[in-house]
Amino acid sequence: MANLANKYAENVAGKFYVDEQCIDCDLCRETAPANYARSESGYSYLFKQPTTTEEEELCREAMEGCPVEAIGNNGEG
């Protein structure tokens, strides 16, 4: 389970985030490319919080599909 205390600094403020467990598998970037990006350091982060129902659903799908549970939702926003 993702830990808010271990989230990457690149994540934008808001409810979804990626933490240090990320293994750079690309699943979130393929599932929700409008929201997740790849750091040059080799991990994903959330560069844009979802602003539409579709983006919210895709971010939630990415979170549920993450093989190492590195995506979190702190319920904020």
Image: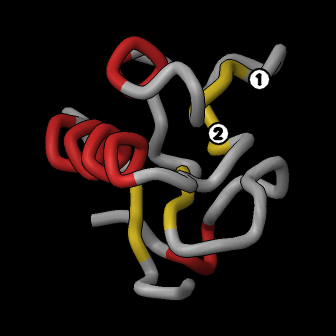
State left or right for residue 18 relative to residue 72. right
Tell me the quarter of the image containing the N terminus.
bottom left
Q: Identify which amino acid the numbered label 2 is placed on.
A: Tyr
Is 26 on the left-hand or right-hand side of 13? left
Residue 35: x and y in percent read 58, 35
Left or right of 75 in this view: 51: right
Give the percent coordinates (x, y) of residue 43: 62, 26
Kindly identify the residue that appears in the image at 50 percent across and 62 percent down.
Answer: 16
Element carrying mark 2: strand
State the residue position of label 2.
45
Q: Is residue 69 visible?
A: no
Query: Residue at (77%, 58%) from the top-left corner?
Result: 12
Label 2 to label 1, Cα distance in Å?
Answer: 7 Å
Q: Is residue 51 visible?
A: yes
* Circle 2/circle 1 CB separation < 8 Å: yes
Identify the mark at residue 39; answer none if there is no mark: 1
Colouring scheme applied when the structure was drawn: secondary structure
